[in-house]
Image (tube, rainbow, N blue to C red):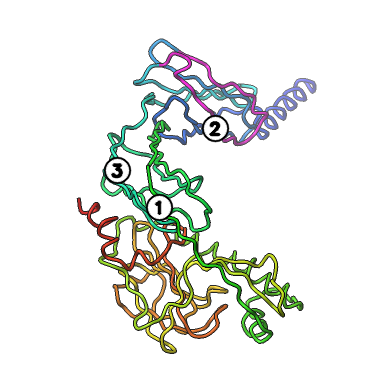
Amino acid sequence: MKKVVFLFVAVLLILVLGFLSGILNFSKPTVEYKSAPFVGQSSNVVLLLKDEKPGLKDVKVYINQGNTSIKVYDANLDGKKEESLTIKLEPKKYGILEGKGSIVVEVRDNSLLRNKTVFTKDVTFDFTPPTISILNYTSNMINGGTGFVFFQSNENIKNAQVYVGDVPFKCLNLNQKYVCPFSLPYYFDSPKPVTLTVSDYADNKSTHSLNINFKWINYAKSILDLDDNFIQTKVKPLSDKNIQDPVELFRYVNVQVRKRNEDLIHKKTSECKNLYPMFEGDFIYLENSAKLGGFADYRKYRYNGQIIEGADAYHKGFDFASVKNADVKASNNGEVVFAGFLGIYGNSIIIDHGLCIYTLYSHLSQINVKEGEKVKKGQLIGKTGATGLAVGDHLHYGVLVDGIEVNPIEWFDIKWLNTRFYDNYKK
């Protein structure tokens, strides 16, 4: 009798331990399908598999159409609690035709019962690239200038970008017609091929070359002299490191600190949250001012008669100077996305004008707006100053397209805006 009781207790204990460990488990693994219900000639399908106790054993993935079922993936999961899979599918290779079908996922857990989940996702197999109609695009540009592509498509587009060389610019869906602002970046030393790449929800792509004539501008190069007063009063306060050597201090601030500041500018100006253009007419700049620093000027710096190697920088906007503490007005309608101190740029404001177009106002002595505020063209937003890495009271003014600085001169010209943008946008 004691042996029977002992055996019963032992079995019970084993069952309890098995249940607690998950070896004896009646729950099934879960499957989440994380991709669109469209599969192209070459598509990635993302799956999220989970099983808390005792973990995942294995998974098989099939593509089905009619009476055809093809295993495309088989893997051991080694008891993992969670696994994210990205599986490349090429259904056309297996004779799958365009039309309806399904993806079937079979996943088992590591329990003694080998609990199995069979998950089925209905999909559409689509192997045809989207057909697009280019309505208009800018055919003549300057390096550092802005261009636009206008197109429409025969189907919903997942992603569209203009590539200038290897630099991508977003295309924005404005009620099933698309507008793509782009630039030949100022730092390129020669023209690059410009292509429009469009993909649908089945990841089918179509690419179209754009024949653009670039008028090349040789932007200025200059050498700026630095003195000890500038190093101590302007450069040193911007450093977060205690660097005693004036040359190393300037190099650190003008390279490393500048990069951090410009990374923030580029992040803010590539979010493109306001799709539709809010701007109207031409863009205005500082009234009754003289232009001092030019766009894309390449600057070297000299201290005690010696060039500071490795500290070169582009000047990525215009410098306008008027009277001290002159009124700075919003260049056009928009929304403030940044208002605060920005390192070498000093007190700064960034305004989103919609359609991935932004303006930057820097070295301000006063900021009169806050982040999230809507502003009107000509509205007072601050006062000029000499904050940051600035010599004398002035406004640094920049225009950016999808995170890339562009030549502001075009945006002051209503004729240029009409022929490149407004006339086509109104159509």
- Location of residue 218 in the rendering, given as x and y in whole percent from the top left corner: 49, 61
Query: Is the residue marked by circle 1 packed among few (<14), some (14-19), or many (20+) residues within 10 Å?
Result: many
* Left or right: 321 in relation to 346: left
Above or below residue 368? Residue 354 is: above
Disc 3 vs disc 1: Cβ atoms closer than 8 Å?
no
Q: Amino acid at mark 3?
A: Phe
Front position in the image: 25 or 85: 85
Q: Residue at x 60, y 27 (%)?
A: 109
- Location of residue 149 in the rendering, given as x and y in whole percent from the top left corner: 33, 47
Q: Can residue 75 be found in the magenta stretch?
A: yes
Q: Which residues are magenta?
A: 69-96
Q: How many marks?
A: 3
Q: Which residue is mark 1?
A: 182
**Residue 237 location, quadrant:** bottom right
As drawn, the label of residue 86 is 2
How far apart are the two marked residues, 3 and 1, measured between alpha carbons? Answer: 14 Å
Q: Amino acid at mark 2?
A: Thr
